[in-house]
Amino acid sequence: EAQVTQNPRYLITVTGKKLTVTCSQNMNHEYMSWYRQDPGLGLRQIYYSMNVEVTDKGDVPEGYKVSRKEKRNFPLILESPSPNQTSLYFCASSNIMTKGALTDTQYFGPGTRLTVL
Amino acid sequence: KNEVEQSPQNLTAQEGEFITINCSYSVGISALHWLQQHPGGGIVSLFMLSSGKKKHGRLIATINIQEKHSSLHITASHPRDSAVYICAVRFDVYSGGGADGLTFGKGTHLIIQP
């Protein structure tokens, strides 16, 4: 079954304790992305990757790191989490269309609800 | 800052009604996505448009590039259509868009009553 998986689904942690949220897709997609969703602000893009070893900042990259060492995995790293990073996080992936840099339909993971105390 | 505006923010309708959700953006784009987020939180991509119109079942999405506007229509609405509908755009490079960054509207919360 084609899917995007995220782990963990729920996480409660404390300020400053490094954490990693994993994201994996089994569709051989080039494009992967991380978003956060907050009440009243909607979805905002954190980082995205057009292919292995190619990553770029989205609208809200501060406090986050990513890596793309393999095509299927795109982990999100919070080196020193703070309470303002409490949010619902989504990973997504898609093919990249051949015309320009347009992306195709995105497939979303189930979400990770993170609470930083 | 390039922005995406959706309207209405909230919409309650009766089963069977024709639904229209609107999305406007401030500068040129190269792609527009419509997403559906169910009450449980999962997000599904409905359409990706760069021009014209697309149809899938009871859902129709249109885009007018000149007017910088897109609409999502639901025909013969059903309670299972109740969800948050989100518009997202990729602003083109001449508008300051990144290689493939997406900017999202705040969503339209739709409730279809039986």
Image (cartoon, coloured by chain):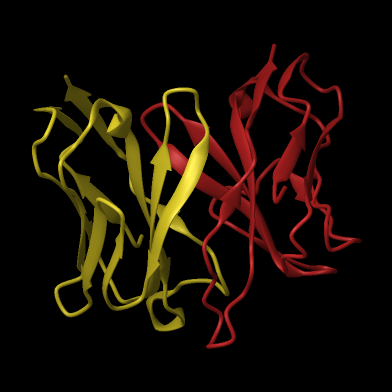
Chain colours: A red, B yellow
Q: Is residue B25 visible?
A: no
Decide which of B40, B57 is in the foreground and name it: B57
Q: Residue at x 78, y 14 (%)?
A: A14
Q: Residue furthest right?
A: A69
Residue A103, percent from left and from top: 54, 71
The residue at 72%/65% (across/down) is: A29
Answer left or right for A117 relative to B7.
Answer: right
Asked whether residue A50 appears in the rendered view, the answer is: yes
Q: Residue A58, relative to residue A6: is it above or below?
A: below
Q: Is residue B42 left or right of residue A113?
A: left
Task: Report x, y in % for residue B81.
Answer: 29, 34
Q: Quadrant of the N terminus of chain B?
A: bottom left
Location of residue B48 in the rendering, given as x and y in whole percent from the top left corner: 41, 65
* Residue at x 47%, y 72% (from the top left corner): B97
Residue toward you, B39 or A35: B39
Is residue B111 placed above or below B4 in the rendered structure? Answer: above
As drawn, A95 above or below B86: below
Camera-side residue: A71 or B18?
B18
Quarter-wise, where is residue A18 in the image?
top right
Q: Residue at x 56, y 70 (%)?
A: B100
